[in-house]
């Protein structure tokens, strides 16, 4: 059995950019394939997209970045510096977690995309 392949696409069901799992092809030439959204698990048939490696190298300096802390709140497009990882990145998305908390998706220079907690409320 072949490896599972993923591609980032706009899901037609949840209308969000999500990681889509390629679950099968329709025709012998391989022009169309079934994709399943990893967020809403909706399957849809789309034309096969030739994957291009994107240049994700960010050009950031520590001076323009804010130090990351789970207690702080961030905005999309903001540059942050993670002191534990010694890595800089940009906030690409915000979301609400299943337990009612908040998270940000950050694309780091060295670590790639990571989901981090934000606006963490300390329990009394």
Image (tube, grey):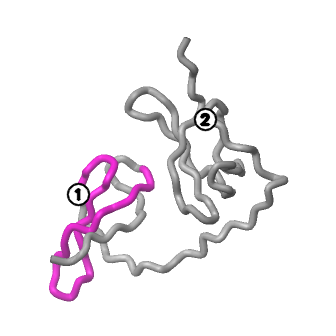
Q: Give above or below for 79 relative to 102.
A: below
Q: Which residues are magenta?
A: 16-42
Q: Which residue is mark 2?
A: 70
Residue 43 image label:
1
Residue that appears at 75% across and 45% down? 66
* Callouts 2 and 1 close, C-beta under 8 Å: no
Relative height, residue 27 to residue 79 (above, below): below
Question: Quick check: 81 left or right of 95?
Answer: right
* Residue sitting at x 64%, y 64%: 109
**Residue at the extreme bottom of the image, as rendered:** 29
Q: Quadrant of the N terminus?
A: bottom left
Q: Disc 2 to disc 1, how far (Cα)?
A: 35 Å
Residue at horizontal 57 percent and vertical 20 percent from the top: 122
The one of 44 and 88 positioned closer to us in this rendering: 88
Q: In this rendering, which labeled residue sits more in front, label 2 or label 1? A: 2
Residue 124 location (% of width, % of height): 55, 11
The stretch drawn in magenta includes residue 118: no
Around disc 2, counting alpha carbons within 10 Å, would you say few (fewer than 14), some (14 to 19), or many (20 or more)?
some
Residue 46 in the image: state x and y as whole percent.
29, 69
Residue that sits furthest to the top in the current view: 124
């Amino acid at each position: 059995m072949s490896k599972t392949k993923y591609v980032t696409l706009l899901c037609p069901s949840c209308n969000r950019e999500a990681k889509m799992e390629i679950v099968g092809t329709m025709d012998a030439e391989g022009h169309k394939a079934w994709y399943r959204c990893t967020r809403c698990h909706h399957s849809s048939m789309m034309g096969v997209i030739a994957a291009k490696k994107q240049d994700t190298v960010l050009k950031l300096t520590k001076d323009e970045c804010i130090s990351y802390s789970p207690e702080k709140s961030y905005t999309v497009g903001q540059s942050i510096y993670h002191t534990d990882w010694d890595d800089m990145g940009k906030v690409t998305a915000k979301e609400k977690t299943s337990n009612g908390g908040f998270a940000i998706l950050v694309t780091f220079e060295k670590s790639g995309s990571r989901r981090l907690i934000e606006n963490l409320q300390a329990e009394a």
